[in-house]
Amino acid sequence: MKLIDALRIVGQEGNRELPVLHIGLVCGFAPTHLQTFLAAHFRRASGGQRVEINSGLYGDLLGNLDRLDSKNADVAILVMEWSDLDARLGLRGLGSWSPAALPNILEDARARAKQFLSAIERVSREMPVAVCFPTLPLPPIPFFPGWQGSSFSLELRSLTASLSADTARIKNVKVVDPQRLDLVSPLSERFDAKAELVSGFPYKLAHASAMADFLVRLAQPSTPKKGLITDLDDTLWSGILGEVGLQGISWDLEHKSHMHGAYQRLLHAFSEAGVLVGVASKNDPALVKQALAREDLILPGRAVFPVEASWGPKSDAVARILRAWNISADAVVFVDDSPMELAEVQTRHPEIETILFPKNDFQALNDLFYGLRDRFGKSSISMEDSLRSDSLRRAQEATTVASTQSVETFLEQAEAEFEFEFSKDQADSRAFELINKTNQFNLNGRRLTEASWQSFLKDPDAFLLAVTYKDKYGPLGKIAVVAGRVQAGSVVIENWVMSCRAFSRRIEHRSLEELIRRFNADEVVLDFELTPRNGPLRDFLSELLEAEPASHCRVSRHRMLDFLGKTLPRVAEVARG
Amino acid sequence: MADVKTRLLDCFAAVFPALSPEDILRADHHNVGQWDSVASVTLFATVEEEFGMELDLEDLPGLTSFEKILAYLTSKVTA
């Protein structure tokens, strides 16, 4: 982004329906253009949300960090440079570079790094923090020629690498990846000596824009994709299964098909991290079943669900997979080596992102792996992530059983167990994740920033109910969240989401019963808003209200109990936390 | 490519979005309230980026109005 474009974006009015986001920009240099780029990238990433960026005093990174708290910022962005560790590491400081001074510079830098770590930890308890550690070249301080690594420079880099790793381990803190920044902003194109001396701003504009882009991605992460549908022949493996047979397909160096093995390895890692991996292949189903049972597959067959192998159009197979996953098409990526198949799927499912598997171009394949990681990347892996694929498989088995029985009979026979937990644990990211990822059973579709979520949890009137479910088909994990406030005998529900994996188990009914029981409320107010996708929740509310739900619809305790009495099944166990 | 005056007008409009094109033509650091030292830094960086050139340090103190910057850029571009 050019500075003039950033200024134009910032100069626009912004979306007045969204609250102003207050950003604490913590740096030791003059923030000028970085501040502009941050504001512009935030605007662009958040649909025009207005931001107010406050920075501190020049040359006082640690003091600026110490002065930051939740009263003056919703989110912190910290940008450190070498001179923040010791002024002698910058161009502006004129402290000695004599060989005798080097041990003292290192000693000061180590001490300062410890102080930064402790200050970042403190701030992270109040707000999300995004950090970028030094990105500029070190000045020519050591007495070695520049092409020879000195212990001084290497120790400094080791110090910031350790500081970065320690910082990245802190909950609520995200760190810019230096390698990725190197790829988009070459080291030689970063430092602006004139700007540093004239205005105290050390970066060339392109580098400042790249840093701002990365920092905004950390502070305002986009929703990762949920599912990947892959082709088999010449994609998951090399060779056409129907032509070369079970033993003819390959994915190794010996057969010059190693990149297919590397692709399998990536997909296996995805599935272990909760990404749904399915197969859509024009093939003989019996043969595919045998191929996916091969024990030397790097992506084991059990990690793939569902497998749609047939001779019909791939768009039909994709439709069946979407139904089995019960997720929307825009959360899915389809990978195939055939442009024709990609086009056919794209025509029928325009929201799916289709990606060509460039089977003969190793460099493009390597780039594809990075691209897929970006699309599916997430900051943490929850227990629910590891359960997702298995639970979907079990859900299909359960659905088959349930289709022949009433819900009540099914739940009794399924030995359903619910756990209701009222806790505002800020360390539990699952509730926040569910609210921001769920579409179909979602009260209003509103997404929250980490800052607004933490602010909500701190409100003494706020409550958070999380529901965990398991039955004899296996655990589903934490699958529903109700969040709101209790006001004068009313329970006001502001967010209510439930994973689609948990439909048809009366969890929504149970959740309402728990709220009434817990708060002894006279009425429940639901901050409902119809979205293009929350039909299942609208249908439930229509049943409850005996009318189409309106915004801020109210249900009396009497009506609620009457409704629940008619619809709730008997269940084996209910645990309460 | 747009002429120097149009491009400079774009730079001023980005840095001082409240000014009309007519105001920009008359703008100098005395009659534009928002034209402080930070605005100068932003304006000069925007001009350098837009015109792909570095402004000489010694010339910066004299670049105090739209008219003076336009004359400076015109002389550099045609030199």
Image (tube, rainbow, N blue to C red):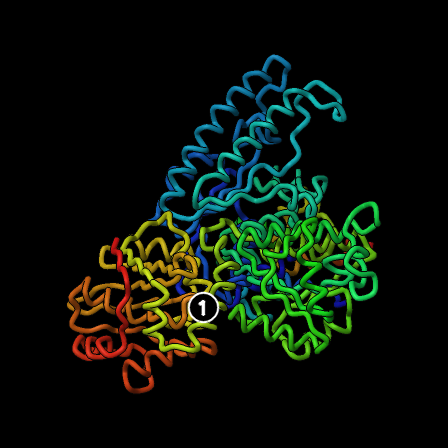
Q: Residue at x 39, y 41 (%)?
A: A123
Name the outermost residue toward the bottom. A547
Mark 1 lies on residue = A398
Q: Residue at x 27, y 82 (%)?
A: A545
Q: Residue at x 51, y 58 (%)?
A: A390
Q: Residue at x 58, y 54 (%)?
A: A271
Q: In the picture shown, does residue A128 fall above or below A327?
A: above
Q: In the picture shown, does residue A192 fall above or below A229?
A: above
Where residue A469 appears, x then y in whole percent? 36, 60
User: From the image, which quarter does the N terminus of chain B lie in?
Assistant: bottom right
Is residue A48 at least partly visible in the picture? yes
Q: Quadrant of residue A106?
A: top right
Using residue A525 as the reference point, say whether residue A24 is left or right of it: right
Near-viewer residue (A407 or A9)? A407
Where residue A439 appears, x then y in whole percent? 46, 70
Q: Quadrant of residue A291?
A: bottom right
Disc 1: which chain?
A: A
Where residue A294 appears, x then y in whole percent? 69, 53
Using residue B11 as the reference point, say whether residue A165 is left or right of it: left
Using residue B52 as the reference point, say whether residue A520 is left or right of it: left
Amino acid type of disc 1? Ala
Near-viewer residue (A465 or A159)? A465
